[in-house]
Image: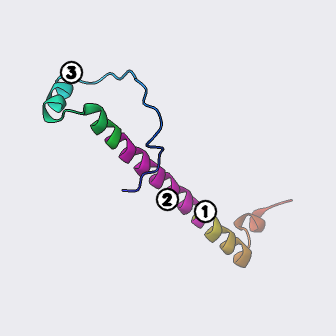
Amino acid sequence: MKVTYDIDARKRPVNLTLNEDLVVQARALTENLSGVVEALLAGYVQQEHQARLAKAKAVDTTVDMWNDFNAKHGSFADEYSTL
């Protein structure tokens, strides 16, 4: 996975509210819970960025298709407009 954030940025404490049992189980599996959470958060951020870019691309493609259709066939509203 390509790193898309400044890995050298300073670390700061944050306040999270998490299920206590889940935290206990996670701590039993890793000595670096903060590192695991940071890696998961980085993956989430990258996934969301990609999803938003894909959605924007789909919207742009739809707008382009509609504009092409309108240029070839005109607007449906023109047929019914009284202006």
Q: Is residue 50 left or right of residue 36?
A: right
The image quarter containing residue 32 is: top left
**Which residue sits furthest bottom?**
72
Residue 54, numbered label: 2
Residue 60, numbered label: 1
What residue is disc 3 on?
Answer: 20
Q: Which residues are magenta?
A: 40-61
Q: Is residue 37 left or right of residue 70?
A: left
Q: Nearer the viewer, residue 6 or 47?
A: 6
Residue 1 part of the magenta segment = no
Q: Is residue 35 left or right of residue 70?
A: left
Identify the residue at horizontal 70%, vertical 71% (top origin).
70
Q: Nearer the viewer, residue 14 or 82?
A: 14
- The label nearer to you, 3 versus 1, is 3
**Crowding at label 1, few (<14), some or many (≥20) Cα neighbours within 10 Å?**
few
How many angstroms separate mark 1 from mark 2 (CA)? 10 Å
